[in-house]
Image (cartoon, helix red, strand yellow):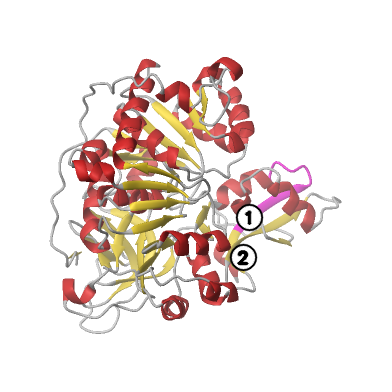
């Protein structure tokens, strides 16, 4: 049977992301701090941010970018990310956010697949951005280097070139329910990365869905270390904090000392993390050297958080630790432990081994993967594991130019099949127990085995290969390669690891190698990963 969210439905306005976030700005809001750059101490107010977004939209429109066009963003977290991202959406174009760790080949692959007409980046990533832009045939002036020398000196526009003319934002018209706002890339349940088409309504809906559950207020200071290019950071940090008029302390990467210093110096009240950060906070002795008493809430996502680990962080830092669940295809949040379970549901928080309850306006099913039958809510305890299905306004439009993959993921009734095995308790609280899908999650990042397998097979000394998730000595899931050498070829594990590392982002690296005589496969040629995991 299906079960609905226990939270009341929320209103989802039929407007663009820009209108949703900024149309209600008051004069007092305009004076509030939106973004803080702790490196320089620079502050961007809400009034300044909206002015920059409008100017960016005007600059893009003057360059012929509008409805139906795609612009790539290749950048770590910097305050200008918010300007560029929302400027693209304000101009009616679509933003495809690119992982800042990508190699030139990976960047080019996403630019080509998304059909991007422009790429915006920063100086530290300019080398790979230029190589990618050249590979896909983008003109020099279609590569914007925000902190670069500028159009006259380098041929590449910079932030001054874009914003200084202060051109008015264009008048654009589109249907928020069907117009693609963003194209993050995800591997979905299997295979190579695909463009996830998320509409303005998808993004608006998900921020509206999580708003009453987050408990964020204009007085909150939120540390933004999760990357904005990832859907988790994009929705839960960037968009949600801006709607709630909070202040974002922007960090380009995670560094434990800087993280702790920023929490102390800026009196951070809320933190959104992935589990590896929780490990450091629970175990590292340096944590005791900082005053972190301003923190009242911490939310973990992107990968499962162990209950014991989460409780250890909560106890050490004297804060409220929560967990949520989602995926890019769900914009991304579909389940969450609310900031005040007692007030909202009249019960205590569930264990941190759970991902909480379905967000408002959604319906869930737990489906037996063997029979396809719905599984009922249990009278007590937890149900048997089944695949989690989700239906709601946050479900993506589909995968870009991939009708088959879309049909395989979203059924005729509108339920998105997550590919995750879950259990549910009598209240509808969900516990993720395993993955049906073959995707490996390394430190919260998605690592698609098929992509690494295809790369390994390009090595002239490798006859066949398979990649699976394996657990290392620290309990972390890592990509492990099973390799069949070519006859009489000499090849070491270190050589395999180095080969892959030279061609992919650091988080995708193969971290263990085992040589075997043959890759086990089914009669249809499908790799039998379960046999390799034994």
Q: Quadrant of the C terminus?
A: bottom right
Q: How many marks?
A: 2
**Residue 69 placement: quadrant:** top left
Label 1 residue SS: strand
Q: Is residue 410 above or below residue 292?
A: above
Magenta span includes 466: yes
**Residue 492 placement: quadrant:** bottom right
Residue 71, position as x, y percentages in the image: 43, 29
Q: Is residue 80 above or below residue 282?
A: above
Q: Is residue 350 above or below residue 31?
A: below
- Foreground residue, 385 or 524? 385
* Dot label at residue 532: 2
- Foreground residue, 430 or 344? 344
Left/right of residue 347 with respect to residue 407 in the rendered view: left
Residue 48, position as x, y percentages in the image: 33, 36
Residue holding disc 1 = 466
- Measuring 61% from the left and 65% from the top, which residue is drawn there? 532
- Foreground residue, 217 or 118? 217
Q: Is residue 370 visible?
A: no
Magenta span includes 40: no
Q: Are marks 2 and 1 in contact (CB under 8 Å)?
A: yes
Left/right of residue 371 with respect to residue 441 in the rendered view: left
Residue 522, position as x, y percentages in the image: 56, 57
Residue 263, position as x, y percentages in the image: 45, 62
Q: What's drawn in magenta, residue-wise?
A: 457-467
Label 2 residue SS: helix
- Measuring 23% from the left and 47% from the top, which residue is drawn there? 412
Q: Residues within 10 Å of mark 1 (few under 14, many from 20)?
A: many
Q: Is residue 368 visible?
A: yes
- Measuring 29% from the left and 63% from the top, which residue is drawn there? 335
Q: Residues within 10 Å of mark 2 (few under 14, many from 20)?
A: some
């Amino acid at each position: 049977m299906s079960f609905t969210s226990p939270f009341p439905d929320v209103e989802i306005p039929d407007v663009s992301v820009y209108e949703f976030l900024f149309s209600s700005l008051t004069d007092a809001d305009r004076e509030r701090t939106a973004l803080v750059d702790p490196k320089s101490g620079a502050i961007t107010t809400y009034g300044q941010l909206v002015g920059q977004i409008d100017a960016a939209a005007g600059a893009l429109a003057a360059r012929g970018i509008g409805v139906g066009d795609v612009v790539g963003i290749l950048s770590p977290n910097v305050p200008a990310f918010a300007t560029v991202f929302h400027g693209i959406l304000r101009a009616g174009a679509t933003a495809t956010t690119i992982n800042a760790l990508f190699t030139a080949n990976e960047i080019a692959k996403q630019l080509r697949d998304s059909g991007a007409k422009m790429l915006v980046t920063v100086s530290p990533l300019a080398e790979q951005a230029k190589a990618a832009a050249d590979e896909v045939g983008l003109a020099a002036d279609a590569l914007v280097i925000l902190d670069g020398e500028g159009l006259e000196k380098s041929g590449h526009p910079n932030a001054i070139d874009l914003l200084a003319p202060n051109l008015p934002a264009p008048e654009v018209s589109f249907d928020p329910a069907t117009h693609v706002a963003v194209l993050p890339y995800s591997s979905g349940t299997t295979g190579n990365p695909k463009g996830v088409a998320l509409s303005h309504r998808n993004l608006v809906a998900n921020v509206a869905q999580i708003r009453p559950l987050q408990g964020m207020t204009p007085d909150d200071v939120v540390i933004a270390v999760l990357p904005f290019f990832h859907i988790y950071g994009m929705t839960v940090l960037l968009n949600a904090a801006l709607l709630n008029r909070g202040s974002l302390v922007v960090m380009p990467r995670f560094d434990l000392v800087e993280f702790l210093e920023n929490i102390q110096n800026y009196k951070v009240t809320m933190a959104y993390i992935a589990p590896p950060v929780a490990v450091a906070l629970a175990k590292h002795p340096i944590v005791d050297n900082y005053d972190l008493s301003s923190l009242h809430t911490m939310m973990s996502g992107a990968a499962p958080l162990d209950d014991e680990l989460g409780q250890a962080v909560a106890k050490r830092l004297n804060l409220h630790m929560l967990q949520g669940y989602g995926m890019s295809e769900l914009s991304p949040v579909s389940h969450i432990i609310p900031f005040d379970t007692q007030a909202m549901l009249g019960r205590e928080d569930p264990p941190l081994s759970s991902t909480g309850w379905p967000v408002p306006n959604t319906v869930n099913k737990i489906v037996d993967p063997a029979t396809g039958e719905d599984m009922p809510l249990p009278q007590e305890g937890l149900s048997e594991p089944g695949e989690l299905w989700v239906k709601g306004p946050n479900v993506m439009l589909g995968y870009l130019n991939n009708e088959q993959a879309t049909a395989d993921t979203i059924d005729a009734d509108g339920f998105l099949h997550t590919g995750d095995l879950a259990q549910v308790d009598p209240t509808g609280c969900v516990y993720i127990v395993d993955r049906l899908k073959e995707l490996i999650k390394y430190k919260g990042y998605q690592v698609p085995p098929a992509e690494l397998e295809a790369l390994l097979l390009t090595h002239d000394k490798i006859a066949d290969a398979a990649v699976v998730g394996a657990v290392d000595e620290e309990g972390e899931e890592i990509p492990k390669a099973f390799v069949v050498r070519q006859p009489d070829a000499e090849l070491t594990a270190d050589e395999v690891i180095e080969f892959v590392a030279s061609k992919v982002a650091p988080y995708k690296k193969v971290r263990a190698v085992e040589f075997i005589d043959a890759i086990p496969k089914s009669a249809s040629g499908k790799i039998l990963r379960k046999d390799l995991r034994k």
